[in-house]
Image (cartoon, rainbow, N blue to C red):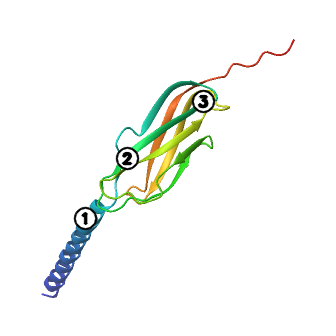
Amino acid sequence: MKKICLFAVLGLALAFSSCSKTEKKSEEKQADSKMPVFALIDSASYEFGAVEEGAIVEHSFRFRNDGEYPLIVNNISSSCGCTTPEWPKEPIGPKETSSIKVRFDTKHKSGPQVKTITVYANTEPAYAELRLKGIVNAAPKPEAAK
């Protein structure tokens, strides 16, 4: 009899604990669905083709906040000091669009190039990656004086 009561109590405890976990997961999913969403309008990668060394490549990555709360871009870092981003400092409201402008200075760069720009925001996941890709043709070397 004691064993039956013990198993009944344990069964009830297990049933109630699994209900609370299910409720928590449901609440977390609802909170996640309301988070800001960094949604690119175009591609996350921009192919700039072939350019001469010394050229400045510029591209604007357009995005929209598909979440229910304002999206805040906290920081942006690039894989190289030759790549500089400009981003909106003010919050981007739900369903609003904005852009991140990226400049790549090809000075002292030649050959195939891939530059990664990491965008940190109050989203889930907390970051997104953008890429510039292309080929930089070496500048002609000046002839030595004779």
Q: Where is residue 107 in the image (x, y as percent from the top left)?
A: 66, 32
Tags 3 and 1 touching, CB below 8 Å: no
Q: Distance between the residues labelled 2 and 3?
A: 26 Å
Secondary structure of the residue carrying numbered label 3: loop
In the displayed image of the protein, which residue is found farthest to the right?
146
* For residue 125, above or below residue 30: above
The residue type indicated by label 1 comes to Gln
Question: Dot 1 corresponds to which residue?
Answer: 30
Residue 34 location in percent, x, y?
28, 62
Q: Which amino acid lies under the numbered mark 2 shown in the image of this protein?
A: Phe
The extreme top residue here reads 146
If you read the primary sequence from the N terminus, does the residue marked by circle 3 or circle 1 appear first? 1
Q: Which amino acid does label 3 sit on?
A: Ala
Name the residue beneath numbered marker 2.
Answer: 63
The residue labelled by disc 3 is: 55
Q: Which of marks 2 and 3 is nearer the N terminus?
A: 3
Which quadrant of the figure has residue 80? top right
Q: In this view, does 18 lie to the left or right of 46?
A: left
x and y, in percent, of residue 71 in the image: 38, 58
Residue at image position (82%, 16%) is: 144
Mark 1 or 2: the one toward you: 2
